[in-house]
Image (spheres, rainbow, N blue to C red):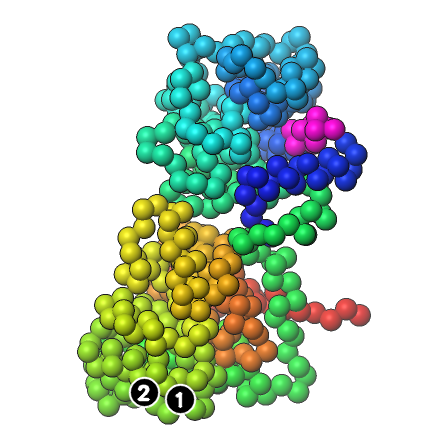
Amino acid sequence: MKLLTAAQTRQADAATIEHEGISSLALMERAATAFVDWLTARLAPAEAGAVLVLCGPGNNGGDGLAAARLLHQRGYQVQVGLLPADKHSADFEANRRQLPAAVSVADWPPQELPPIQPGTVVIDALFGTGLSRPLEGAAAALVQHLNAAQARVVSIDLPSGLFTNAPQPADSPVVRARHTVTFELPKLALLLPQNASYVGQWHAVPIGLSPQFLAEVSADMHLVDAALLADKLPARPTFAHKGTFGHALLLAGSKGKIGAAVLAAHACLRGGVGLLTVQVPGVGYPVLQTAVPEAMCLTDTCKTHLSELPDLKPYNAVGMGPGIGQDDMTRAALEELLCTARAPLVLDADALNLLGANRSLLDLMPPGTLLTPHPKEFERLTEKARDDYHRLELLRGFARQYQCYVLLKGAYSCLAAPDGQLYFNTTGNPGMATGGSGDILTGLCTALRADQRLSPLDAALLAIYAHGRAGDLATADTGQAGLVAGDLPRYIGQALQELTRTEPF
């Protein structure tokens, strides 16, 4: 699924109107109906009480007026508050004329803002994706009044005052919504941590925008969902054997952190790798052999940390980083890996911290290397980001400069590809914010990179999606608070099975 800019969203609306031969007012009615269908499926009239719809002077306000009429028709008690303006859009005016007389409509000037009782259901239809400057004057006063009211706010398309594709100026007023109902496709602003307090939970509702336009429009940002990954993972051949799915090597663990190696190994095996070898320091040998009997174990000559590499020729992918520490001997082993490896590399955790502390090593990374940092680890590789949008610029630039794949972890984890494309994941939940989840991802990435049937991009996309999906499946049993990283491998197989290509009859 593509993520469109505000300008492209307007183009999609125009293309739909042209291709279907409908009016903009008809498309607005379609959007308002989709919004009202979403709302009424979750909130009965008796529970809603008096619904307040706040409308701006443009087409977002027109959406609100249409929603107010439709809610009234479905038995809801509706009041409309209008932001005073000298000029209104044509579709706003058309929808205002269609409002039933029974719907109370009043201007809300800043000097006479009526009180909003706590718990009131408020539909925010003040401003949408066309906003290009911070709110001020009467609009800013109304937003601040709404935010102080402790109402149950649902924003149409975007919280009013929020920019679609640019960082928010400091202290600019933005509606703080509980829910944001956006049309057809999510917007970038909905996916970024800095906007979470404004967006609340977001929901995309279809309104039938032109499929031809959406298929043909160029985009450099995408949403990773099951539809994007359909047919990416081939079914296993009948006569497959353990060599068919690759031999992976994990370089992991140090004294006190052998658990990281165990977690990564379990995930790698559940990710479908044919053979797995794990090299750990000497102290890790009995732990790994007992905890992961399916893996072959190599022991470093150093007892407490990794200091050397095995012969790399047998391996189809190498993962390094979970629990390895930052000893100078480990740094030397990482440098040797970067210089000599011919198989694809997956680097995480302390491997990334070693790169950040020794940035000259970045130039040694083989093209196609996959890095899986969290934001702080990525900052050590680049610089401190001014905001989430700047961080995405740094991410895109880093992937292009080093011709690597970078998976920035978090809610809506973002994968940057060497060609500058960005992919935002849709699976996962806050229960996965627990120690060891990153080690699971490293093992899974390494398993899928070892599978020679997959391209580097497909392997990374499958890994990020299946990792989050495993978390979603696990929390259905454990709850978010009860989830631990060790739960995740048990659900990786099911997550991958949902994505496996099936042959038609």
**Mark 2 highlights which residue?**
309
Cα gap from disc 2 to disc 1, whole angstroms: 8 Å
Q: Position of residue 407 (x, y in %)?
A: 43, 62
Is residue 91 rendered to the left or right of residue 399? right
Amino acid at pointer 1 = Leu
**Dots 2, 1 in contact, CB < 8 A:** yes
Query: In the picture, residue 42 is in which quadrant?
Result: top right
Identify residue type, mark 2: Leu
- For the point 72% across and 39% down, the residue is 16
Please state the horizontal and vertical placement of residue 198, each as a whole percent of the image: 42, 35
Q: Under tag 2, what secondary structure?
A: loop
Query: Mark 2, residues whose alpha carbon is within 10 Å: few (<14), some, or many (≥20)?
Result: some
- Residue at image point 72% right, 48% down: 212
> Which of these two is toward me, 480 or 439?
439
Q: Is residue 335 magenta?
A: no
Give the residues in magenta: 23-33
Circle on res. 192:
none
- Residue 90, by quadrant, is top right
Q: Residue at x 53, y 53 (%)?
A: 221
Residue 315 locus on image (x, y percent): 45, 86
Q: Which residue is mark 1?
A: 312
Rendered residue at 77%/31% (across/down): 22
Q: Is residue 303 left or right of residue 251?
A: left
Q: Which residue is more in the foreground, 94 or 75?
A: 94
* Label 1 neighbour load within 10 Å: few <14, some 14-19, many 20+: some
Q: Is residue 323 visible?
A: no
